[in-house]
Amino acid sequence: MFLSERARAIAPYTAGEQPSDKRYVKLNTNENPYPPSPLAAEALKKFDADRLRLYPRPDADGLRAAIAKAEGVSPENVFCGNGSDEVLALCFPAFFDTDGKGACFAEYTYSFYDVFARFFSVPCVKIPMKEEFYLDFDRMGACSCDGYLIANPNAPTGVGVPRGEMERFISSVPDRIVIADEAYMDFFGESCVPLTACYRNLLVVKTFSKSYSLAGIRCGYAVGDAALIDGLFRMKDCFNSYPVDAVCQEVCGAAIADAKYHAETVSRVVAERGRLREALLALGFTVPESRANFLFAGRSRLSGAEIYRQLKDRGVLVRYWEKPFLRDFCRITVGTREQNDVLIAKLKEILA
Ligand code: PMP
C-alpha cells in the first residue's frame, strides 16, 4: 500500500543468477573466466583503508584520465558510472524527452533498454531484425525517433557490426544521437571510439565488467563529444554525486593501464570462443558467429529453458529467455578450456 503506482506497475530487469548453494560451472552472466590484471590486484592490496573516511573524487578525474589515455581521447570526453548499466540508464533522461519521438533499438537486444525507457517514461521504437539476427539499418534510419541504442556486439545474439557499417549509419543520422553499447566490443576489435572525434552524435559506452574481468567492482564509462558528456554529468549530479567509489577508481585505473594483460586475456577468450562454437556446431546446434564472450546456441526440439534445466541439474549454469524467438536458444558464456569441456560433455549426455 505504500508503493507508488510506478513501483507497482513496472517490470524490472532480471539479472542472471548468482547462486550460493553450490559451485557451478558458471557460464550464465558473461563474466570473464580469467582473473583481473595483476596490476589491478596490486592496486587493491595497496589501497589504504584510511582513505575511505573521505568521499571519493566526485567526477572520478584520475580514472577518467587513465581511460582517456587508453582510449586516445581527452578526459573531458569521458564519463564514468557505477557499471555501464548506470551510464546507459543516465543516457535516457540526458538524451530523450518523455514527450519526444522516442529511443529506437532492435527487437532482440539488451532487455535493459526497454526497462530504462519505461522507468524514465521515454517512448521506445522497436525495429524487427533482418533474418532474426541482423540490424535493419534501413528501417532504423527511416523510422521516427530521437536517437538509437545499438548493442555492438549485440546481446544476446553475439552478432557484431563492423566499424565501417556503423560509421555509414552514424553519418546518415547526424541529428539523432547514436549510443553504441560496446560492453563486449573488446572481443571484436571494431570499436567506434575513434569515430567520436568526428561525429558529435555518437556516444560509446564501455565497461570493466567483461574484458577487464572486473564485474564485481561495478564500473562503466562513456566516450563522446564534451557536450554529450556534460549531459551525463548533469544527470549524475541529480541522482548520485559519487557513483564511482575510491577503491574502484584506483583498481580500474590500474587495470586499464595494463594493455598487455588485457590483450592476452581477450585473445584467450576469443580462441576458446572459436573452439566452443565448433564443438556446439558438431553437436547440431545453430550458433550465429559471435563477436562477444558468449555464444547464442539453439537446437531443434529443445527449448533454451530445457537445456538450462538439464545443464543446471548437472552443475552447469547458462541463461535462457521466455520470449518469442529467444526461447529457442540459450546463451553460453565462454569459459576456460576446462569449463567449456565440462559443458560439452554434459550437453553430449543430455542429447544422448
Ligand atoms: N550492455 C550489455 C549489452 C550487457 O550485456 C551488459 C551486461 N549485462 C551491460 C551493458 C552492463 O554491464 P555492466 O553494468 O556490468 O557494465
Image (spheres, grey):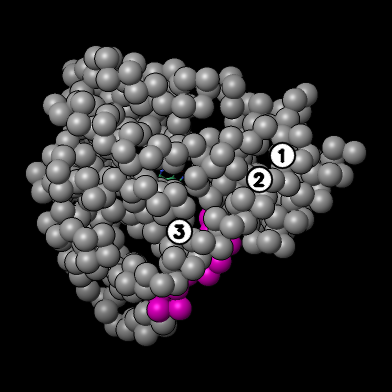
How far apart in space, not on screen, are marks 3 and 1 (Cα)?
Answer: 25 Å
In this image, 70 relative to 176: left or right?
right
Residue 277 circle label: 2
Q: What amino acid does circle 2 point to?
A: Arg
Residue drawn 56% across the image and 63% down it: 268
Q: Nearer the viewer, mark 3 or mark 2?
A: 2
Residue 100, percent from left and from top: 18, 19
Image side of residue 223 versus residue 293, left or right: left
Q: Is residue 12 visible?
A: no
Alpha carbon separation for disc pair 3 and 2: 19 Å
Highlighted range, magenta: 31-40
Identify residue type, mark 3. Answer: Ser
**Which type of secondary structure does the marked residue at label 2 adopt?**
helix
- Where residue 204 sits, quadrant-wise, is top left
Q: Which residue is mark 3?
A: 211
Q: CA distance from mark 1 to mark 2?
A: 6 Å
Verify CB contact (< 8 Å) between mark 1 and mark 2. Answer: yes
Q: Main secondary structure of the magenta part?
A: loop
Label 3 SS = loop
In this rendering, the answer to whether 249 lies above or below 24 is below
Residue at 62% x, 50% y is 274
Q: Which residue is under mark 1?
A: 281
Q: Is the CB of the residue bearing disc 2 within 8 angstroms of ligand 1? A: no
Which quarter of the picture shows residue 105? top left
Between marks 3 and 1 in the image, the one whose residue lies nearer the viewer? 1
- Assign a secondary structure to mark 1: helix
Rendered-image quadrant of the N terminus = top left
Q: Position of residue 69 (x, y in %)?
A: 22, 66
- Number of labelled discs? 3
